[in-house]
Image (cartoon, rainbow, N blue to C red):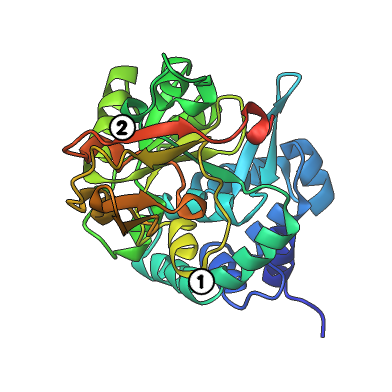
Amino acid sequence: MSKTIYEKMTDKIMLTGSKIIPKLFEMITNTEEAELLMAMPGTPEQLAEKTNHPLDKVESLCKTLYHKGLAFKSFKGGVVGYKMCRDMIQFHDATILWAEASREYHDLWQRFMEEEWPGFARLAEQFFPKPFTRVIPVQESIDSGKQQVLDADSVNKIIESADTVALTKCTCRLIAHKCDMPLEVCLQVNNAAKYTIDRGSGREVTKEEALKILRECEEKGLVHVTMNKAHVGHFICNCCGDCCQALPLIITEGLKICDPSRFQASIDPDLCSACGTCQDRCYFSAIETKDTPANGSVMQVIADKCLGCGLCKITCPEEAITMVEARAVDFIPQ
């Protein structure tokens, strides 16, 4: 049996076998739009030739697909081209933020995240040498005077070095509705910010506003997550353990689909009062109580579970926690 065009689109974003993704494509595209997406990449002129449609019609369809979040602009030699979303993450994030997306569309995405995404995430863990994302520690938790702190380790540096910053709603919490954490907390930088502003799926913010949002997210207990690259990436997500694409699968399944930061929490037993604040704060069950001969009950970090987010450090009433450099500079891919 030949595949439908929506199944072919699903293959193109590397989710072959999904029963839900073709339905998502079908919900927001007609056959004509789907055929144009499958003809991409190309300029409107090239796409008109490929599809045998008039140029003005192709230009109009490209703008519609860009607005929906299914097509992305590319620029080469001053000429604008269009390309289809390359993977599940682009498809998920861009179309969920489409202003006209229905509640039914959001609900079907959440069904995919709960029923099919865990299986695809396991395959991704095996197939890709490094996860797509990584944790960045809370800025206040790391001491640049005592250890090497790269620009890539610093949410402040990422924001301060950006040309443009934009703010969007968290697409994961927007469809999951599993917690009461703030919704408008995802920061886009540089090209991603310009895309967000151009498409109207978010709003431009100043660097001061962005830094304030980061501090508020830290107080709420949200984990900073960004692209797993040494250069300034496209985004800083502020993730919870209930709705996020990655963190719940790390917590419940033990999947390694988001790298830790280069830092790790360390608790001084001489200062620890075993109050349990850090344990309550940790999403990853990386802190346990241990009885010691010298200090009695103290909290202790389980090294292989700690993702180095630093949320435990900033709320320790005894200041017993430090973030130590645990991974080499080249841990973060170039």
Q: Quadrant of the N terminus?
A: bottom right
Kindly indicate the quadrant of the structure image that contains residue 203. top left
Residue at the spot of label 1: 112
* Amino acid found under the numbered disc labelled 2: Leu
- Please give the name of the residue rendered at 76% of the width and 19% of the height, measured from the top-left corner: 77
Circle 1 packing at 10 Å, graded few (<14), some (14-19), many (20+), is some
Which residue shows up at 21% across the image and 39% down it?
Answer: 315
Query: Which residue is found at the position 56% from the left and 44% from the top?
Result: 133
Please tell me which residue lies in front, 88 or 243. Answer: 243
Q: Amino acid at mark 1?
A: Phe
148 is higher (above) or lower (below) than 87: above
Quarter of the image where one finds residue 164: top left
Q: Quadrant location of the C terminus?
A: top right
Q: Which residue is mark 2?
A: 214
17 versus 183 height, above or below: below
Q: Is residue 232 left or right of residue 206?
A: right
Mark 1 or mark 2, which is nearer the start of the sequence? 1
Q: Between tags 2 and 1, which lies in front?
A: 2
In percent of width and height, residue 115 lies at 51, 77
Residue furthest to the front in view is 293
In the figure, 280 relative to 217: above or below? Answer: below
